[in-house]
Amino acid sequence: AQSVTQLGSHVSVSEGALVLLRCNYSSSVPPYLFWYVQYPNQGLQLLLKYTTGATLVKGINGFEAEFKKSETSFHLTKPSAHMSDAAEYFCAVRISGNTPLVFGKGTRLSVIA
Amino acid sequence: GAVVSQHPSWVICKSGTSVKIECRSLDFQATTMFWYRQFPKQSLMLMATSNEGSKATYEQGVEKDKFLINHASLTLSTLTVTSAHPEDSSFYICSAWASGGAAYNEQFFGPGTRLTVL
């Protein structure tokens, strides 16, 4: 069965600093990987996804993630944090077809002015 | 893009009553929908998978008689929390699988329903 581990339940960065949110996955088959953002009392918004092809994936709001098979990782980065980036971020994995997404526990990002 | 709606967005009910939450795919047909539950400051936990016209498949530990799921059409799935108790208070999120076309083949999420049981 597939699973996702997000290292760090809470990450705090200064405004303008690099954002790095870590995600490692476990899957017996090539996975599809996703990052979602959730603002308080709201649903999920897809930031980016990796299915096949280019391992560096660019998403919305300046975020990007790189699929590294050798490290079973899919870390999320953003060069310069903005106050509006403060939210909960979830990494998720799916193995195939219409099987449901399996989510990590989430990382809360705080941005300090 | 594919849009999933949920109704109501929030509901408060008394203990012992039943609450129905609707999940609709607005501009696509969803043969498969998923129901997740999220407790405060926690991740989304899959409750069940529903396929149009058939019985839902529940995850281990989820009471199927308490959380009734109906997926009667390709655009509507409902979750009914029966005899709700305070421990059922949570954020319920539905998701629909959109297949077909390069822009799809992914899950789209509804905005969630906040249930508070007094």
Image: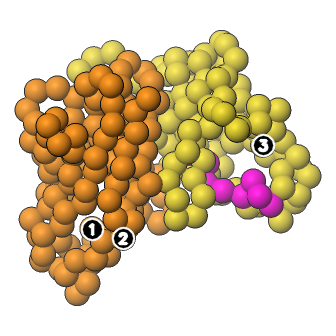
Above or below, A69 relative to A10:
above
Q: CA distance from mark 2 to mark 3?
A: 32 Å
Find disc 3 in the rendering and name its residue: B81
Tell me how the rendering is colored.
by chain
Q: CA distance from mark 2 to mark 1?
A: 13 Å
Residue B50 x, y percent position in the rendering: 61, 24
Is B64 positioned to the left or the right of B32 in the image?
A: right
| Amino acid found under the numbered disc labelled 2 | His
| Amino acid found under the numbered disc labelled 1 | Asp
Q: Secondary structure at mark 2?
A: strand
Residue A92 x, y percent position in the rendering: 36, 42
Density class for disc 1 (Cα within 10 Å; few <14, some 14-19, many ≥20) is some
Is A97 positioned to the left or the right of A72 in the image?
A: right
Density class for disc 2 (Cα within 10 Å; few <14, some 14-19, many ≥20) is few
Colour assigned to chain A in the rendering is orange
At x 28% / y 51%, what residue is drawn? Answer: A23
Is A37 positioned to the left or the right of A65 in the image?
A: right
Asked whether residue B66 appears in the rendered view, the answer is yes
Residue B7 x, y percent position in the rendering: 63, 45
Q: Nearer the viewer, mark 2 or mark 1?
A: 2
Residue B75 x, y percent position in the rendering: 56, 24
Residue B92 among magenta residues? yes
Colour assigned to chain B in the rendering is yellow
Find disc 2 in the rendering and name its residue: A10
For residue A85, which numbered disc appears in the image? 1
- Does the residue at mark 2 contact the one at mark 3 (Cβ under 8 Å)? no
Q: Residue furthest right?
A: B16
Q: Secondary structure at mark 1?
A: helix
Mark 2 vs 1, N-terminal side: 2
